[in-house]
Image (cartoon, rainbow, N blue to C red):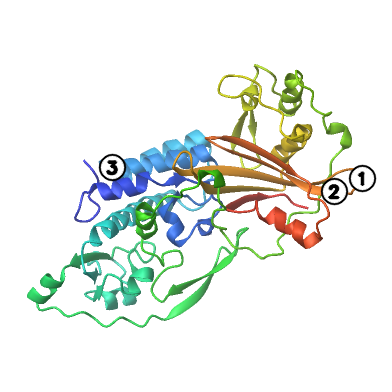
Amino acid sequence: MPAAYGSLPFDAQIAFFRRKLAMPSRSWTDIVHEHHDHAFVVAGAMRMALVEDLQAAVQKAISEGTTLQQFRKGFNRIVRDHGWRYRGSRGWRTRVIYETNLRTSYQAGRYTQLQKMDFWQYHHSPSSSDPRPQHLAWSGMILPKDDPFWRTNYPPNGFGCKCTVTGMSRKTLERKGLKVSPSPKLKMRRVKIGTRGPNPRTVTVPEGVGPGFAYPPGRDAWMHTHALPPLDPSRGFPAGPRIPDFPARDLLPSPRKFSANKLLPTFRRGKEEEYARAFLAEFGADIGKPAVFVDATGEPVVISDAMFRDVRGRWKIAKHGRERYLPMLAAALKDPDEIWVAMEWHHALGKAVIRRRYVAWFELPDGSRPGFAVFEYGRDGWLGVTTFPRNLPADELDGEVEKVRRGIRLYKRKP
């Protein structure tokens, strides 16, 4: 039976959570506000398989009504299987993961249902053991569903918040003799978060709302569901949201020298295996002999000759002379300057996919052409890019690099 987290055991909650994509992250500050409508993250869980197992455990809790105690048993198994060392006590960590995801997904489902109502009423839960004064002050307040208050104060409004919202029509409002409340004047505050992590930032939230909670769960997903799809699939993958916005001059380390001896000769048809082997050998793999490479964050990447074959098994290597730089792509994967993970919209599949991007900044031996190599992969495939822009000023060259630095940065090489 679906979990009844509140008064309704309904499919909207289950569907909302199921649409989320598992996404590795270093800190809870990597994803805030409406981006949670699309991504499932657990602070410090940076390996995809680990995040996916945690997501499956939460999905089971939502779909089958798993209790916190049952969730903890599954959590123990997942931690053991992946060797995950998490911060905080087991009791605190499991409660935060379990309750926060169940409450936000429940309220997201309610958000979809409430669209049919003209007015919404805020309710503070009497079961709260430590009531927040602001939440008590809002309890009973009735506002139109399009009031700005709901854009930042729709519950939950912080960790452990049990507040909820109900809806009513204008006829119900009049029949019960209720009056619409004046829109409250919110006092906004700026809060610094993630100051101990790699991506500190400042967020603006109303008084009484915790950092990361100033958004209505489900609104962003609901708007995407009702939005028209793009018409031009030839545009490929658009740049996703830049999360987080770190200082503009947080640049890559200085470019490293790349030996000319490692570059491959100009491509000759019939020599495809030689080029594939040059890449595979960097990871201890060979034709018909795959290998598993573990990156700087602990994420495994399967390396095999299938990476260089099309759906019919034919070699697919030659690409505008870029095949010479396959060893440079291997270097970007093995020893990147940065590792990013981001959600991208896949036009052909009609859905978002998770892509992991390895970025490395190199300089050819003569020093004339600095450029960068990017190795990117997801479940739908991989992509290799080597770019040596010519005759660009330093600031414009930096701009070219910035185009591939988006999503969540999981790793940065020390200079």
- Disc 3 marks which residue? 63
Q: How far apart are marks 2 and 3 (CA)?
A: 55 Å
Residue 130, position as x, y percentages in the image: 31, 69
The amino acid type of the residue labelled 2 equals Arg
Under circle 1, the secondary element is loop
At x 69%, y 46%, the residue is 359
Foreground mark, 3 or 1, reads 1
- C-beta proximity under 8 Å, tags 3 and 1: no
Q: Nearer the viewer, residue 232 or 7?
A: 232
Q: Nearer the viewer, residue 221 or 253?
A: 221
The amino acid type of the residue labelled 3 equals Ser
The amino acid type of the residue labelled 1 equals Asp
Q: Which of 14 and 222 is in front in this view?
A: 222
Q: Distance between the residues labelled 1 and 2?
A: 8 Å
Residue 195 placement: quadrant: bottom right
Which one is earlier in the sequence, the residue at label 2 or at label 3?
3
Residue 254, position as x, y percentages in the image: 81, 53
- Image quadrant holding the N terminus, namely top left
Vertically, is 294 above or below 357? Answer: above
Which one is earlier in the sequence, the residue at label 3 or at label 1?
3
Residue 136, position as x, y percentages in the image: 28, 75
At x 51%, y 36%, the residue is 82
Identify the mark at residue 369; answer none if there is no mark: 2
- Disc 1 marks which residue? 366
Residue 355 placement: quadrant: top right
**Residue 21 in the figure: left or right of residue 168:** right
- C-beta proximity under 8 Å, tags 1 and 2: yes
Under circle 2, the secondary element is loop
